[in-house]
Amino acid sequence: MKFDIKKLKPSDLLAMYTWLLLPRLIEDKMLILLRQGKISKWFSGYGQEAISVGAALAMDDDEYILPMHRNLGIFTTRRIPLHRLFAQFQGKAGGFTKGRDRSFHFGSKAHHIVGMISHLGPQLGVADGIALAHQLKKENKVTMVFTGDGGASEGDFHEALNVASVWKLPVIFMIENNCWGLSTPSNEQFNFDSFTLKGPGYGIQTMQVDGNNILEVYHAVQKASELIKKENQPILIECMTFRIRGHEEASGTKYYPEGIIEEWQKKDPISCYETFLRVNKILDDETRENIHSELNQQINEGLKIAENEEAIHAHVSVETHDVYAPFKQKITIPKSRRKNTLRFVDAISESLRQSMHKFPELIIMGQDIAEYGGVFKVTEGMVAEFGKDRIRNTPISESAIIGTALGLSIHGMKSVVEMQFADFVTCGFNQIVNNLAKSHYRWEQHADVVIRMPTGAGVGAGPFHSQSNEAWFFHTPGLKIVYPSTPYDAKGLLNSAIEDPNPYLYFEHKALYRSQSQNVPQDYYTIEVGKAKYVHKGDDLTIITYGMGVHWAIEAIQELGSLDAELIDLRTLLPWDKETVEASVKKTNKVIILHEDSLTGGIGAEIAAWISEHCFQYLDAPVMRVASLDTPVPFAKTLEDNFLPKERFKQRLKELQAY
């Protein structure tokens, strides 16, 4: 193995040896702790240390790195306190996730590290977002994100590289090609010789380096960083290496061909670099022994602190409190009484415009939202007002764009992402439920992201453009969900969602866009999140609904005439207003829940169960639910009308009234 020192001094080379050795010695200790049952799992980086250490040393300390399972050297080179690192591995409170996640599934903003989630690919989009924030703030910084040869088979890899190339983002994509995805060899993962073939297809410059040569990695990252800062482009670096131990210790290495480990051990990054230093009279036995002794002492001291820390205690209040980033909403009242008559769609547009002025760090992203104004024209004219840096057309890359939104949040920005249709959110589902929703609970990173969701049927759009999918997310702690039914609420709730640093899904019914108008304050204002609204007060029974259901309920009450119903518009679905529901049920003693989503597993089921559990003694009739059929949404009008619950609701109202 040849080592090109270029302009590095002997002291630099010796320091590199120290940094290179540290993760290896830590891993030796961790394997002992694993056998002793003091840690539960270990992902080995044996043989790959040169990539992590060389890359981290080549980056500025204030530049973000997004590492993976085998990048212990990133964390150590960034000087993460060892006792906290070991506490993290042991599930202690002194770790970075308060015992809520293990190994390297954490981040530290102080060290400019963003840890991975187990799904591998999503962090690539997050890196795009951090890089975009650097670009917009003109900070001339580079972001580095790691993936493996196996993880690069995921769609997130394609999406993130494409977005980075189109937007010319300052990102280094580091691919650790260790030839195996757990037990699956490369020839069963992909059908090409090198990842350097991938870059040109995206318009991205690529490099391939010997990942076991720390100097080669270091110089390649330095060169890439200089090019990126000079030419404003992403770069892909493929690091060729091999994983000596199993994917994780329990999986072993029996699937490796005989002799392959021995061959790669000859290229061990530490022993080869140590030999180079000895030959060049930079390292001798005494110096080597002193370095080993000092590092082992640091490791033992860190382990002692971590092991002496008491086992973590569980407190329900703490666990539930930390699901969301702390935010105490301050309700903004309109400054004047001036109002305009706005359609539902115009109220959303006005909210976005006013929020863009209020928050200069706010970015809006989505497909066709710039010059075209979006398929529903919500952002029409905004490019002229705010420019294309802030009103950004995106590729058709839902996962990467939601990941980008999280990356923007990590670097102090806000974003609104438009799903062209709520149905298309499936392509970004993982980013929402596993990344946005869990970030604060896992490592106290807020996700200041609002995802706009044009939703609902009744417009003849068929199975792929008409779904009501709010219940998919209702079950996910860490998200907030709002669903307005009027222009007034549409503006106020969207303003509230954008103010809050927590992730929101903002559902807006397409059939309401141009069918509903209302006098809406001209000024900026907000509405309390988690607070339902009485549309009608009454004594006969309670109707609980939201979105289009509010308008169906109003129509049904008017048709029945004699019915004195209390109508509650939830407005916020997560968290939903239990207090208002309870007070109304105690008053009327009868309740019916209406929603457009299909019946089975819908939000109404949870509300009905809660009422049965907490208000049973006040009920004079069974809790009723009315919803759409348990089928996909059909296209033909007669079939769609049959699918929707509007007419069935009127009949059930009569039944409940007669109880």
Image (cartoon, rainbow, N blue to C red):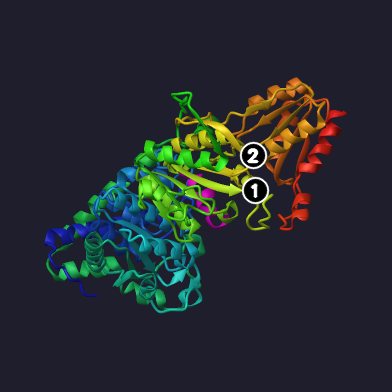
Q: Which of 405 and 9 is in front in this view?
A: 405
Residue at x 37%, y 49% (from the top left corner) = 384
Residue on which the image places disc 2:
547
Q: Which of marks 1 and 2 is nearer the N terminus?
A: 1
User: In the picture shown, does residue 486 fall above or below 125?
Assistant: above
The amino acid type, in three-letter code, at marker 2 is: Gly
- Picture coordinates of residue 294, whole percent (x, y): 23, 50
Q: Give the range drawn in magenta.
A: 426-439
**Magenta span: chief secondary structure:** helix
Observer-nearest residue: 245 or 7? 7
Point 52% across, 46% down: residue: 452
Q: In which quarter of the image is the C terminus?
A: top right
Disc 1 marks a residue whose amino acid type is Gly
Q: Nearer the viewer, residue 539 or 243?
A: 539
Q: Judge left or right: residue 70 versus residue 16.
A: right
Q: Residues within 10 Å of mark 1 (few under 14, many from 20)?
A: many
On whether residue 427 falls in the magenta region, the answer is yes
163 up-or-down from 564: above or below: below
**Residue visible at 54% across and 41% down?**
479
Q: Is mark 1 on a helix, strand or loop?
A: loop
Q: Mark 1 points at which residue?
A: 456
Q: In this view, does 579 lie above or below 312?
A: above
